[in-house]
Image (cartoon, rainbow, N blue to C red):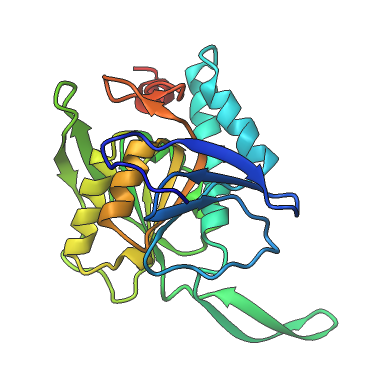
Amino acid sequence: MSSSSKQQPASLSTSSNGIGNRITTINSNSFAIKAQTTAEKKPVSEERMLVFVPPHPLIKHWVSVLRNDQTPSPIFKNAMGELGRLLIYEASRDWLPTVTGEIQTPLGVASVEFIDPREPVVIVPILRAGLALVEHASSILPATKTYHLGLVRNEETLQPSIYLNKLPEKLPEGSRVLVVDPMLATGGTIVAAIELLSGLGIANKQIKVIAAVAAPPALQKLSEKFPGLQVYTGTIDPTVNEKGFIVPGLGDAGDRSYGT
């Protein structure tokens, strides 16, 4: 990838890797963005942030529903939940702790593998829009613990402030954490959330971020501060406007989810 100034928005380009996968790249030397199929295995870099845009048609469908300014609030909120379900499914691939054993079926003995309930995935939704994106997490993940974070962004400075922090004083060593923030625009909110987790001893490689839409300013900021982080997003849009909204984006995810 070619390098770019940190003060300039990164540019996007799309190409094919020859095996049916769409690869989306951002001009950056600190992170890579890719869409890959289930069968494609790639080594994960410890030094670069990876951003995954799963090329599933259902993900594209629900992102399209969310983009439509005519989508009513109840359908918008449902679409957020469905998109979150799919992204969490993709993010949890090859990531969950398992236990093996044998069980008796009606016809014989079978070797089996279960998700280990002794190591629940920690889910941290950023209020309030994060609640809509994470609504169906329990239908994907057999064992979870949810800790809410409330952050609000100043409309003039675009800087976040915390109004609710339900994180525990300590998380178990080796915890796997999903941070759910629908809109990665300027990056202030998601950075503040991950810094709180870092203060609890959670390493970057233990965290995966779930987002509906991401933009280069947030991705660049995350890559500079948290190498080894992984981000799963429904799509990547090219710009953020002067008010801190992603363009074309889908509007205010919280307002549209809850009709306020």
In the visual, does 81 lie left or right of 171? right
x then y, percent, for residue 103: 69, 84
Is residue 51 shown to the viewer in this render?
Answer: no
Q: Is residue 51 left or right of residue 217?
A: right
The residue depicted at 55 percent of the width and 38 percent of the height is: 13
Q: Is residue 53 visible?
A: yes
Nearer the observer, 33 or 3: 3
Position of 101 with respect to 110 (left or right) is left
Task: Name, please, the residue furthest toward the right.
Answer: 107
Pick out the residue farthest to the top: 70
In percent of width and height, residue 240 lies at 35, 26
| Residue 134, image x, y percentages | 44, 44
Residue 33 point in image, percent of width and height: 50, 50
Of the pair 129 and 153, the residue shown nearer to us: 153
Whether residue 239 is situated above or below residue 143 in the rendered picture: above
Tell me how many marks there are.
0
Residue nearer the viewer, 229 or 83: 229
Query: Does 63 appear above or below 138?
Result: above
**Residue that appears at 26% across and 37% down:** 7
Residue depicted at x 28% and y 40%: 187
- Residue at 64%, 32% (x, y): give it: 61
In the displayed structure, 98 sits above or below 186; it is: below
Quadrant housing the C terminus: top left
